[in-house]
Structure formats: C-alpha cells, structure tokens
Amino acid sequence: MLEFAEKVVYAGIALPLIAAACILLVRAAWTGWLVFGDFSQTDFSQTMVLALLDVLLLGLTSWLLRRKEREPDEGKRSDPGRAGGTAG
C-alpha cells in the first residue's frame, strides 16, 4: 500500500512538471516565431533547432538515468535476484 502511495505522489509531481515543460516549449516556439517571423536567417533557425534538441535530449537522458539508477531498496522489493538485490 505504501509503495502504491509513493508512486501516486511521484506521478502527482511528475505530471504537472511534464505539462509545464510542454507548455513552455510551445510558448517558446510561438514567441520565437512571432519575434523572428519567417526564420529567414538560416544561422538563427539552425541554432534554435539545435537548442531545442539539446533540451529534449537532456530531458530524455535524465529520465533514462532515473530509470537506471534506482534507490538500493527498490531492487530488493521488486526482484531479489537482480544486481543490487540480495540473493535469497
């Protein structure tokens, strides 16, 4: 029961953060479009695309690292045979 409550709390924190990140990305793109119009400046548009990719890759990397680097007791509860868990 406690494990379920912990997951609910984490989801309750993660969902607003994900929604806020999506909203901020859309607003940044919209503001960039309004400020710079048709993006006829090739150097600027390439820089903006690379910056957006950097942000997305950073988010993906942090998510993957969180999945890989669990707390030590998380492995023990779910699968005792896994690395990091006790072997019976």
Image: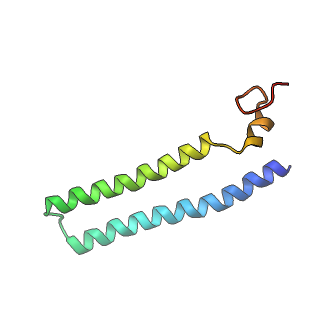
Quadrant assignment for the C terminus: top right
Residue 67 position, x and y percent, is 61, 42
The total of numbered circles placed on residues is 0
Residue drawn at 71 percent across, 45 percent down: 71
For the residue pair 26 and 79, the one nearer the viewer reads as 79
Instruction: Specify whether 72 is left or right of 55.
Output: right
Q: Quadrant of residue 44?
A: bottom left
Q: Position of residue 18 (x, y in %)?
A: 54, 59
Judge whether 81 appears above or below 2 on screen. above
Q: Position of residue 7 (x, y in %)?
A: 73, 51
Q: Nearer the viewer, residue 45 or 37?
A: 45
Residue 77 in the image, given as x and y percentages of width and height: 80, 37
Task: Report the residue that reaches farthest toward the bottom.
Answer: 35
Q: Which residue occupies 79% across, 36% down?
A: 76
Q: Is residue 52 left or right of residue 84?
A: left
Residue at screen point 79% across, 29% down: 80
Q: How is the image coloured?
A: rainbow
Residue 37 placement: quadrant? bottom left
Q: Is 35 on the left or on the right of 55, as rendered?
A: left
Residue drawn at x 47%, y 61% is 22
25 sits to left or right of 83 = left
Q: Is 77 situated above or below 80?
A: below
